[in-house]
Image: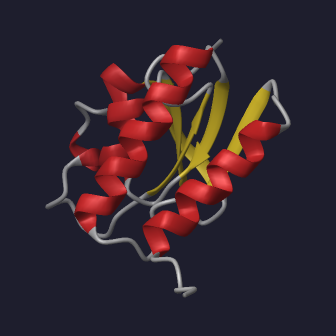
Amino acid sequence: MARVAASGEMQMLLVGGALVARPKLLMLDEPSVGLAPNIAEELFATIAAINREQGLTILLVEQNAHAAMALCDYGNIIESGRIVLHGTAGILGTLPIMRPDDGPPRRLIPTNACAACSA
């Protein structure tokens, strides 16, 4: 009997399908959108493991800036289509603009991303 896959399962399948081609760069556009927080956390852990174990560079576009900064080496913070801040995740993560109580969430594009993301 067939069943409909949950959102998290679909995201994992999409990432797995992309990996079959053995890319040198994996580009992910908001992989956590629409996922329950615990499922998004699992997906981010999988992304980090892929980067760590396969040495794959990942470009991650993610509105959850805090989760992205926890995974990436380097990031850009974009507001209204312009890069307003860039730097290492360690530095960006300490800035007041990254605090959840500092207004609306920022759109973040980590480059050479995700937990040791540069290969």
For this rendering, which residue is in front, 71 or 93? 71
Residue located 61% across and 58% down the image: 13
Q: Residue shown at 19%/49% (left/top)?
A: 99
Give the colour scheme shown: secondary structure
Total count of labels: 0
**Which residue, as the protein is rendered here, is positioned at the far left?**
101
| Image quadrant in which the N terminus is located | bottom right
Q: Is residue 29 above or below residue 85?
A: below
Give the residue drawn at x 34%, y 64%. Answer: 105
Tell me residue 45's x, y (percent): 36, 38
Question: Residue 19: horizontal and vertical position, in percent?
Answer: 73, 38
Quarter of the image for the C terminus: give it: top right
Instruction: Please tell me which residue is depicted at 72% across the width and 37% down the height of the picture.
Output: 26
Instruction: Find residue 20 and report its image quarter.
Output: top right
> Does the image show residue 8?
yes
User: As displayed, is residue 53 above or below residue 85?
Assistant: above
Q: Indicate whether 61 appears above or below 80.
A: above
The answer to whether residue 59 is left or right of residue 4 is right
Q: Is 65 left, or right, of 21 in this rendering?
A: left
**Picture coordinates of residue 113 (x, y %)?**
55, 30
Q: Nearer the viewer, residue 41 or 75?
A: 41
Q: Provide residue 65's location: percent of width, then percent of height.
A: 38, 50
On screen, residue 97 above or below 76: below
Left/right of residue 72 with respect to residue 67 in the rendered view: right
**Direction from residue 40 to residue 38 in the image, left or right:** left
Q: Is residue 33 visible?
A: no
Residue at the far front in the pictured view? 1
